[in-house]
Amino acid sequence: DDAVGINPNIGLRWHLVNEDDFTLYADIGIGVIGTTDNVPFDGTSFNFTPRAGVGATIALNDAGDERLIIGLRWAHVSNARINGDDNNPGIDTIMLYSGVQFPF
């Protein structure tokens, strides 16, 4: 079944290569997620969401302020055994993501 959730998180990104037209970075982060149903189905509706990955930004204009961002990230969802060892199913996945960054 489907579930709806809210997933506030915090992340740290380190740009290993920082050129005018592109950057390469590594990032890590963690969050919590509250859902309307158990995630996974035999888990809980409150979970933690650590993640880590790598990515790049590419300038889309001459000023370099609008950028394409692409990345690959490991993501995990589990309740960190808050309901005991027997009730801690987890999900590990690989995320491919992209977007456009605008300055403000």
Image: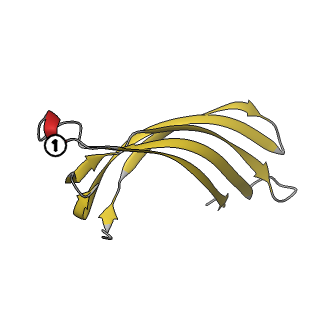
Residue 80 location, quadrant: top left
Circle 1 sits in a helix, a strand or a loop, which is it? helix
> On the picture, is 97 further left or further right than 81?
right
Residue furthest toward the top? 16
Residue furthest toward the left? 83
Circle 1 residue: 87
> On the picture, is 78 further left or further right than 12?
left
> On the picture, is 40 further left or further right than 95?
left
> On the picture, is 31 further left or further right than 99?
left
- Image location of residue 59, percent across then percent down: 80, 52
Residue 36 location, quadrant: bottom left
Q: Residue at x 39, y 39 (%)?
A: 50
Front in this rendered view, residue 41 or 101: 41
- Image location of residue 58, percent across then percent down: 78, 50
Front in this rendered view, residue 81 or 61: 81
Q: Residues within 10 Å of mark 1 (few under 14, many from 20)?
A: some
Front in this rendered view, residue 97 or 16: 97
Q: Residue at x 75, y 34 (%)?
A: 18
Q: Is residue 104 above or below residue 71?
A: below
Q: Is residue 92 visible?
A: yes
Task: Please state the total of marks drawn on the protein image.
Answer: 1
Q: Is residue 13 above or below residue 40?
A: above
Amino acid, disc 1? Asn
Report the colour scheme. Answer: secondary structure
- Image location of residue 20, percent across then percent down: 83, 42
Q: Residue at x 15, y 38 (%)?
A: 86
Q: Is residue 13 visible?
A: no
The N terminus, quarter of image = bottom left
- Image location of residue 76, percent across then percent down: 40, 42
Q: Residue at x 30, y 68 (%)?
A: 3
